[in-house]
Amino acid sequence: MAFDFNVDLFSWIDQWRKTTKLFGWISLIFQMAFSSFVTFCGVCGGILAAGKPTAVAVGFGLCGVATTLATFFASSELTRGMMFVRPVELASKEIAVGEAITRK
C-alpha cells in the first residue's frame, strides 16, 4: 500500500508574503544597505585614490550615502504618505545632477 502524502512546508511563507508588508520592508532595507555600501566605497575610494585626506574622503562618502538613502526613501511605495525632511541643498543637487536610479 503506497501513500501519496504531499506536504508543502513553506507555503505559509508565500502566503505570509502576500498578506503582509514585511518582505517589502526587508527588501527595501537590503537595497538601501547594499546601495549605501557601494556608494560609500566608490566615492571614498575614488577620493582616496586622488590623494585627498581621509577625512575629506569619508565626508564625501557619507554625503553620497545620505543622497542614496534619501532617494530610496522618497521613491519607495512603502514610504508613501510618510513625511520626509531633507536639506534644500540636497534636493537641489539631486535635481541638478539628475540622480541615477537603476531598476531591474
Image: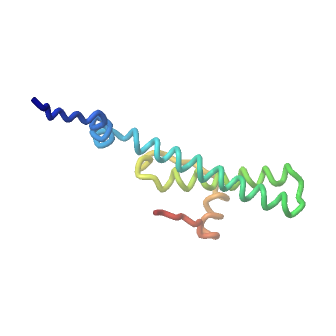
Q: Is residue 15 left or right of residue 23?
A: left
Say which of 4 and 24 sits in front.
4
* Residue 41 point in image, percent of width and height: 72, 54
Quadrant where the N terminus sits is top left
**Residue at x-position 13% and y-position 31%:** 3
**Residue at x-position 60% and y-position 53%:** 35
Q: Is residue 32 left or right of residue 39?
A: left
* Residue 18 point in image, percent of width and height: 29, 43
Asked if residue 42 is positioned above or below residue 22 in the image, the reply reads below
Say which of 48 and 86 sits in front.
48
**Residue at x-position 37% and y-position 41%:** 21
* Residue 52 point in image, percent of width and height: 88, 58
Residue at the extreme top: 1
Residue at the extreme left: 1
**Residue at x-position 52% and y-position 44%:** 29
Marks counted in the figure total 0
* Residue 75 point in image, percent of width and height: 48, 56
**What scheme was used to colour the molecule?**
rainbow
Q: Quadrant of residue 25?
A: top left
Say which of 44 and 56 sits in front.
44
Asked if residue 48 is positioned above or below residue 5 in the image, the reply reads below
